[in-house]
Image (tube, rainbow, N blue to C red):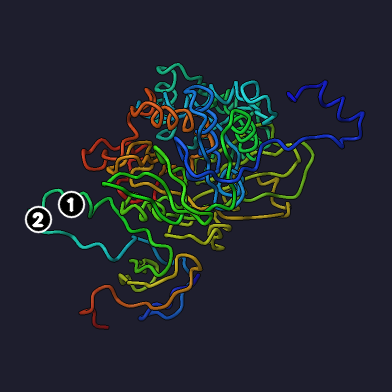
């Protein structure tokens, strides 16, 4: 598996760290028990999965990668924060 | 016929032409008292203990492929009960005790071999950690022995004791730990469950649940609808997907773990050895191949195959531990799907949906738990109460904060 980092180009998977599902949204501070779902529950999809990767051995960007969890095929790689300007 | 030296001799004398199938490949009936989804080790063990201990024999085990086609046939066959937390030790020790009597219980040769599991340590801090673990084990009546470097040298002289970065200082030995022939575990449980009337239905994929008045009363399968009083899920690797059919979201991510077998060798490694400075564990199968593995790949996956960096990492661990294996050729490698839970511990509990029961989240430690998991899940299905040793494995522990995090990693499944 290689990830096509938008800043560094195509790099080996060992340069990146995985955080997980990019779909989860942090609830408001006073949201109560919804926080349990946010911290612990995951859709864990078999198929296209949007997930966070961190390019620790490269440009230190947080990335959102869309990848098929059944085949490891990567469809898109983008900065996690749209406002990231290089 | 019972398996014995006499049945073996009798069959040998008649040219092995009269062996009967070990278990009955059943057609699904319209209804059962209990349906167990998943014909792996845990599902089949559950059926065995339901029939044997709780007297519930109107049971079907539904398997989407062939029995034992999942992780029970894909693991590195290690059994042990060297855990740290009070919520885990009695459960895994029950499992260890059930392993010790398994072959007699099943009348089936599962090649249970208590060859000892040795966890090596390489620093003072790690030694202290293992002292604590060993003490916790002994407080629960589990055998544990702390070995110094000289004792490990005597046991395994071929290890690289004076490695520049990871010198071996000693190890924590559980002599009762060892290995079990994994396929035979599935077949043995299938044999006894089937003999007691349990229907083992293969090529029968569950595609949905039948829900009436908010209660699960059966399943829709690729071979038609089947109704049941209770439905239990034992589908680790695919738990999230099956649970989603009932509208449940689980604290689980599916990850891939790779394992490896070398070419066959003469007897070389007598026991199970784990490297403490990386993640590497190794034993030798009775056929001669070295069976070893390491960390999960670390990202969500349903692919049943991993990537090369983990292969390299595992082999580096092996080389740091025992350089003698450096010229060995790798025969096979494969991947299996792990139900990585949010705290690294399993779930055996009722679900919020009446009639649906969950056995999931085994991370990469499910094989050693097979007998206790089956017994506890059978207890839950039969009595609606948690088994004494499995009380901590609640589904709501993530909401209440009663986590069982052996490694102390927090809610990050790929780090457990």
Where residue B153 appears, as percent x and y from the top left, is 63, 29
When asked about the image quadrant of residue B347, the answer is top left
Q: Is residue B8 visible?
A: yes
Q: Residue at x 92, y 28 (%)?
A: B13
Q: Residue at x 37, y 55 (%)?
A: B245
Kindly identify which chain the residue marked by label 1 belongs to.
A
Residue receiving disc 1: A35
Q: Which residue in the rendered view is the most extreme toward the bottom?
A: A86
Determine whether, in the image, residue B402 is placed left or right of residue B52: left
Where residue B287 appears, as percent x and y from the top left, is 76, 40
Q: Relative to residue B296, is residue A61 depicted above or below?
A: below
Determine whether, in the image, residue A51 is placed left or right of residue B161: left
Label 1: how many Cα within 10 Å (few below 14, some 14–19, many 20+): some
Label 2: how many Cα within 10 Å (few below 14, some 14–19, many 20+): few
**Nearest to the observer: residue B255 or residue B260:** B255
Q: Quadrant of the N terminus of chain B?
A: top right
Q: Relative to residue B11, is residue A81 depicted above or below?
A: below
Where residue B390 appears, as percent x and y from the top left, is 38, 29
Kindly identify which chain the residue marked by label 2 belongs to.
A
Q: Is residue B81 visible?
A: no
Sequence-earlier tag: 1 or 2: 2
Q: Residue at x 33, y 66 (%)?
A: A52
Residue receiving disc 2: A29
């Amino acid at each position: 598996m290689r990830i096509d980092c938008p800043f560094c180009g195509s790099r080996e998977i060992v340069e990146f760290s995985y955080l997980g599902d990019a779909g989860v949204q942090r609830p408001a501070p006073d949201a109560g028990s919804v926080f349990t779902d946010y911290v612990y529950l995951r859709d864990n999809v078999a198929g296209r999965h949007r997930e966070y990767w961190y390019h620790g051995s490269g440009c230190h960007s947080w990335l959102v990668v869309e990848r098929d969890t059944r085949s490891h095929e990567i469809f898109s790689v983008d900065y996690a924060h749209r406002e990231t300007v290089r | 016929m019972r398996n014995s030296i006499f049945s073996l001799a009798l069959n040998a004398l008649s040219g092995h032409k009269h062996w009967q199938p070990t278990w009955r490949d059943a057609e699904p009936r319209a209804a059962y008292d209990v349906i167990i989804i998943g014909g792996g080790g845990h599902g089949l063990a559950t059926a065995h203990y339901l029939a044997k201990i709780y007297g519930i024999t109107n049971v079907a085990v539904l398997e989407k492929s062939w029995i034992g086609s999942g992780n029970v046939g894909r693991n590195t066959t290690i059994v042990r009960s060297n855990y740290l937390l009070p919520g885990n030790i009695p459960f895994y020790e029950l499992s260890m005790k059930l392993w010790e009597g398994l072959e007699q219980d099943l009348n089936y040769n599962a090649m249970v071999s208590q060859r000892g599991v040795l966890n090596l340590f390489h620093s003072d801090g790690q030694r202290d950690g293992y002292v604590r673990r060993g003490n916790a084990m002994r407080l629960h009546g589990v055998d544990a022995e702390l070995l110094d470097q000289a004792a490990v040298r005597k046991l395994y002289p071929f290890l690289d004791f004076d490695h520049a970065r990871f010198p071996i200082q000693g190890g924590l030995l559980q002599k009762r730990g060892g290995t079990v022939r994994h396929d035979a575990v599935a077949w043995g449980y299938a044999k006894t469950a089937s003999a007691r009337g349990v229907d083992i239905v293969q090529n029968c994929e569950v595609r949905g649940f039948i829900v009436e008045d908010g209660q699960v009363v059966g399943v829709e399968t690729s071979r038609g609808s089947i109704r049941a009083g209770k439905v239990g899920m034992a589908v680790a690797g695919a738990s999230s997907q099956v649970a989603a059919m009932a509208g449940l979201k689980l604290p689980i991510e599916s990850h891939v773990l790779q394992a490896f077998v070398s070419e066959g060798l003469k007897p070389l490694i007598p026991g199970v050895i784990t490297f403490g400075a990386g993640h590497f564990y190794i034993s030798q199968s009775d056929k001669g191949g070295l069976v070893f593995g390491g960390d999960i790949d670390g990202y969500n996956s349903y692919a049943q195959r991993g990537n090369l960096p983990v292969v390299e990492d595992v082999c580096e661990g092996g080389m740091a531990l025992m350089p003698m294996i450096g010229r060995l050729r790798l025969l096979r490698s494969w991947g299996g799907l792990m139900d990585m839970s949010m705290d690294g511990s399993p779930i055996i509990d009722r679900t919020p949906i009446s009639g649906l029961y969950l056995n999931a989240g085994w991370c990469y430690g499910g094989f050693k738990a097979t007998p206790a998991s089956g017994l506890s899940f059978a207890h839950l299905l039969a009595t609606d109460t948690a088994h004494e040793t499995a009380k901590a494995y609640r589904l709501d522990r993530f909401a209440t904060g009663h986590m069982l995090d052996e490694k102390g990693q927090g809610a990050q499944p790929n780090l457990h």
